[in-house]
């Protein structure tokens, strides 16, 4: 159902935390695949991704280029693109399942939990239907950010 796209470069600690948050959803079938787009890590990042069963793409370039490559390779009907070097909170799954269970609606962005973070926090990632992602042109070279894609999709913040 969901393809998760992560960009990495010497991101072993962050990747391990994010993959740990994704494992239960992968076991239950909510997460169809995890795609790691790496820009030449020299730490254990690639070993961690491989051990977790992630599909690995090695590609130099800015974050926009790498996110675009990962999303192009995604096979799920939904894409969850996680902002570089950020960790999904353990509580990410509940709100996402509720959103998809209500028919999915439009694109949403995930932020850190907590009332203060709801007011001030940056997006951790964006969840979009593949068709909507393609319609707005997705990520592009030059570093089109998660925040820019959120604006293009007119995504709302996911409650939770």
Image: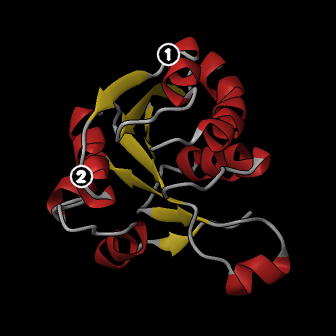
Q: Secondary structure at mark 2?
A: loop
Judge from the rendering whether residue 74 lies leftward or rightward of residue 36; answer left or right. Answer: left
- The residue wearing badge 1 is 50
On the image, which quarter does residue 48 sit in? top right
Q: Secondary structure at mark 1?
A: helix
Q: Position of residue 156 (x, y in %)?
A: 50, 74
Q: Position of residue 104 (x, y in %)?
A: 47, 52
Nearer to us in this view, 57 or 1? 57
On the image, which quarter does residue 157 sit in? bottom right
Nearer to us in this view, 64 or 23? 64
Report the label total: 2
Q: Earlier in the sequence, mark 2 or mark 1?
A: 1
Q: Residue drawn 57% across and 12% down? A: 51
- Residue 135 lies, with reference to residue 14, above or below; the image says below
Label disc, if present, on residue 61 of the rendered structure: 2
Q: Residue drawn 28% across and 58% down? A: 62
Position of the N terminus, as image quadrant, is top left
Q: Nearer the viewer, mark 2 or mark 1?
A: 2
Residue at far front of view = 42
Question: Which colour assignment does the render follow?
Answer: secondary structure
- Residue 49 lies, with reference to residue 102, above or below; the image says above
- Residue 99 lies, with reference to residue 107, above or below; the image says above
Is residue 75 visible from the viewing direction of this image? no
Q: Position of residue 127 (x, y in %)?
A: 46, 54
Q: Residue drawn 56% across and 69% down? A: 123
Mark 2 in CB contact with mark 1 (< 8 angstroms)? no
Dot 2 crowding, Cα within 10 Å, few <14, some 14–19, many 20+ = few
Q: Position of residue 14 (x, y in %)?
A: 65, 44
**Distance Cα–Cα, label 2 vs label 1:** 21 Å
Nearer to us in this view, 29 or 98? 29
């Amino acid at each position: 159902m969901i393809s998760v796209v992560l960009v990495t470069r010497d991101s072993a600690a962050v990747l391990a935390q994010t993959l740990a948050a994704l494992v239960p959803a992968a076991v239950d079938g909510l997460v169809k695949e995890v795609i790691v787009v790496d820009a030449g890590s020299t730490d254990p990042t690639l070993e961690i991704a491989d051990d977790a069963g992630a599909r690995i793409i090695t590609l130099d370039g800015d974050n926009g280029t790498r996110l675009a490559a990962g999303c192009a390779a995604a096979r799920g009907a939904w894409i969850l693109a996680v902002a570089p070097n950020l960790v999904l909170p353990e509580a990410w799954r509940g709100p996402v399942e509720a959103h998809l269970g209500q028919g999915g609606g439009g694109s949403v962005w995930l932020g850190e939990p907590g009332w203060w973070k709801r007011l001030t926090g940056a997006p951790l990632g964006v969840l979009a239907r593949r068709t909507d992602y393609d319609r707005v042109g997705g990520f592009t070279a030059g570093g089109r950010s998660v925040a820019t894609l959120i604006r293009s999709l007119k995504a709302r913040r996911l409650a939770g």
